[in-house]
Every structure is written in structure tokens, then in C-alpha cells.
Image (cartoon, rainbow, N blue to C red):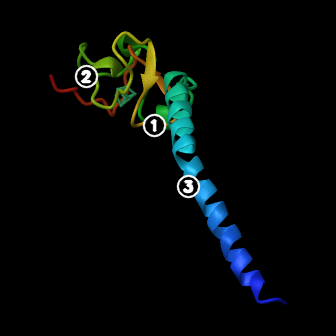
Amino acid sequence: MSEKEPKYARRRFIGTGAAALAAFPVAVMLGVSSRAARAANLPHLQESDPQAKALQYSDDAAKSKRTSSDQFCHNCLNFEGKAGDAWGPCKIFPGKDVNHNGWCAAWVKKPG
Ligand code: SF4
């Protein structure tokens, strides 16, 4: 073993670390854009999903067990879809889109 090996190993480690550091912003940007893409087109929540059943989710609020006719996913605090989107993410069902005209028992009025 020569005396130079630890020095080269340290240089290699620093070089690898610098490359990883340089790649980090790109990875973050790719991660953000892929998350945005996923958020815009998630699989639709199925009424047969066990969590959806537990919360009495329905794609059609008019056919749901809601307590008031003005309750919809689109005016729920947990709905994260954009206005006008037919489907959008919901904080209660991560990884799934819910119907903007749907409803579930976790409905909370969106302020405003
Ligand atoms: Fe719809 Fe709100 Fe239930 Fe999510 S929490 S499914 S947005 S009613």
C-alpha cells in the first residue's frame, strides 16, 4: 500500500461528491416535474377501494350519503384539483384523483 492511495481516494470521494452536488438541482427539478405530471393524471379513486368504502366515497355526490346538497369534492378543503378539472388529487386519498363532483364523509367546507 503506498502513501498516495488515501490522498487519491479522498480526491475521488471529493470528485464524486461534487458531481452529486452538481446533479442535485437537476434531480430536484426532474422530481418536481414528474410529481406535477403525476398529480395532473393520477389513477381515479375507485368506489370499491377499501378506504373509499370506509369513507363512503362516491364519484357522484348526488348519489352519496352527504348531509347537504351543496357538498362536493370541488368545494372541499381537501380537494387539490384546479377549478374546472373533472378529477383532481385529494389530501385524504394520496396517489389518487377524485371526481370534482364526488363526495366522501371527510368533506370539509373550503373557506371562501
Ligand atoms: Fe372529496 Fe373532500 Fe372526500 Fe376528498 S375529502 S374525496 S375532496 S369530499
- The residue carrying mark 2 is 67
- Identified at 25% across, 13% down, the residue is 69
Quarter containing ligand 1? top left
Q: Position of residue 61 (x, y in %)?
A: 37, 15
- Identified at 33% across, 34% down, the residue is 106
- Identified at 63% across, 55% down, the residue is 19
Amino acid found under the numbered disc labelled 2: Thr
In front: 101, or 2? 2
- The residue carrying mark 1 is 54
Q: Earlier in the sequence, mark 1 or mark 2?
A: 1
Mark 3–mark 2 Cα distance, whole angstroms, equals 53 Å
Pointer 3 residue Cβ closer than 8 Å to ligand 1: no
- The residue carrying mark 3 is 21
Residue 6 position (above or below residue 104): below
Circle 3 residues within 10 Å: few <14, some 14–19, many ≥20: few
**Numbered disc in front, either 3 or 2:** 3
Is mark 3 in CB contact (under 8 Å) with mark 2?
Answer: no
Residue 15 position (above or below residue 48): below
Is mark 1 in CB contact (under 8 Å) with mark 2?
Answer: no
Mark 1–mark 2 Cα distance, whole angstroms, equals 17 Å
Q: Position of residue 41 (x, y in %)?
A: 54, 22
Pointer 2 residue Cβ closer than 8 Å to ligand 1: no
One can see residue 45 in this view: no
Q: Earlier in the sequence, mark 3 or mark 2?
A: 3
- Identified at 46% across, 17% down, the residue is 87
In front: 44, or 30? 30
Secondary element under disc 3, as helix, strand or loop, is helix
